[in-house]
Image: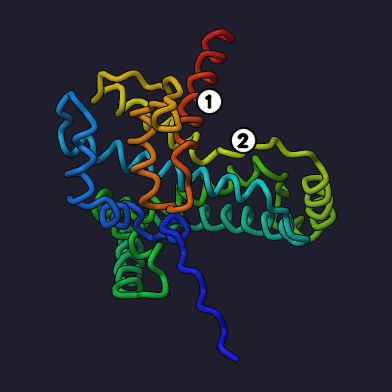
């Protein structure tokens, strides 16, 4: 019996796990896209500025998709235990790397070995690209310091989610706390994001470039019976960006998202 072919993933789905989302967005929004897209603006935007606006909008949509998906998920039974383990490991790594960094010879040895390990390593694409970024931006003595500070920040971040034991010997004793954390977290009502959250995040990101490069107001506009929808130039432009990464998104959602964002901004101003 032949199995039906799998439905190809939408670009936004592959971008969720991208190891170089900037490069992947460059491939999606190519020169042919911008030749058409630039005509929607009457203030002659510079190509790079317009590119930044488009990619930041697409990135916001993908992040919104991820947030909506995470909202609907639950912590696993051992999530709390693993969080505590990760937090304690980050603490230990930070402390040990802090000591290693005091020896230039040790730093040089680890750096050379780590570079060789990650070179052309297809099994660790995220690590390889992250470490190359460190090599490009950090001085030779600071390369391990970057990882040390990241480990320290990771410990602090996890501590903001779940209480960590003061000492490593207390890690096993913290398991009951970890199980209680998961149980309480899964039973608590979570704040629900809007159904149209990904598009609203994209609309929020697209507002500054639209207002910079277009004299047309960033709003949904009036309903036009001749076209059977709202006369919304900004919404059409926003939809042109998003449909490149999500072919299932409806044009009407773009105008609705823009109007929702405008309403939220007005509420923020009133509350201030």
Q: Residue at x 71, y 58 (%)?
A: 79
Question: SS class of the residue under badge 2?
Answer: loop
Image mark for residue 194: 2
User: Considering only vertical position in the picture, is 212 above or below 142?
Assistant: above
Name the residue nearer the viewer: 27 or 40.
40
Q: Residue at x 45, y 31 (%)?
A: 229
Q: What is the x, y in percent for residue 241?
A: 34, 43
Question: SS class of the residue under badge 1?
Answer: helix
Residue furthest to the front in view is 226
Q: Earlier in the sequence, mark 1 or mark 2?
A: 2
Name the residue nearer the viewer: 139 or 249.
249
Q: Residue at x 47, y 44 (%)?
A: 250
Q: What is the x, y in percent for residue 25?
A: 31, 52
Q: Quadrant of residue 56?
A: top left
Left or right? Give the position of 176 relative to 66.
Answer: right
Do the residues under discs 1 and 2 have CB atoms within 8 angstroms? yes
Mark 1–mark 2 distance (CA, rounded to whole Å)? 10 Å
Q: Which residue is mark 1?
A: 260
Q: Quadrant of residue 234?
A: top left
Crowding near the residue tagged with mark 2, few <14, some 14–19, many ≥20 C-alpha atoms within 10 Å: few
User: Considering only vertical position in the picture, is 108 above or below 150?
Assistant: below
Left or right? Give the position of 221 relative to 45.
Answer: right
User: Considering only vertical position in the picture, is 197 above or below 113?
Assistant: above
Name the residue nearer the viewer: 194 or 37.
37
Q: What is the x, y in percent for residue 116?
A: 30, 74
Image mark for residue 71: none
Crowding near the residue tagged with mark 1, few <14, some 14–19, many ≥20 C-alpha atoms within 10 Å: some
């Amino acid at each position: 019996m032949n199995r039906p072919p799998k439905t190809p993933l939408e670009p936004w789905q592959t971008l969720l796990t991208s190891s170089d989302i900037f490069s992947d967005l460059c491939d999606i929004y190519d020169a042919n896209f911008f030749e058409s897209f630039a005509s929607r603006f009457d203030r002659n935007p510079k190509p790079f500025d317009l590119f930044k606006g488009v990619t930041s909008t697409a990135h916001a949509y993908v992040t919104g998709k991820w947030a909506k998906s995470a909202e609907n998920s639950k912590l696993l039974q051992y999530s709390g235990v693993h969080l505590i383990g990760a937090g304690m490991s980050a603490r230990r790594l930070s402390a040990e790397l802090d000591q290693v960094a005091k020896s230039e010879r040790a730093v040089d040895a680890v750096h050379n070995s780590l570079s060789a390990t990650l070179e052309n390593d297809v099994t660790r694409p995220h690590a390889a690209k992250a470490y190359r970024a460190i090599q490009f931006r950090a001085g030779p003595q600071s390369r391990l310091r970057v990882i040390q500070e990241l480990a320290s920040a990771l410990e602090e971040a996890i501590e903001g989610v779940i209480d960590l034991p003061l000492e490593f010997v207390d890690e096993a004793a913290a398991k009951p706390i970890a199980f209680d954390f998961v149980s309480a977290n899964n039973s608590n009502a979570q704040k629900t994001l809007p159904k149209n959250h990904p598009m609203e995040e994209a609309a929020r990101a697209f507002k500054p470039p639209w207002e910079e490069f277009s004299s047309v107001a960033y709003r949904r506009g009036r309903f036009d019976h001749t076209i059977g929808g709202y006369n919304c130039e900004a919404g059409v432009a926003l939809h042109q960006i998003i449909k490149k990464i999500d072919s299932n998104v409806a044009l009407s959602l773009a105008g609705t998202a823009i109007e929702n964002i405008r309403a939220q901004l007005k509420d923020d101003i009133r509350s201030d």
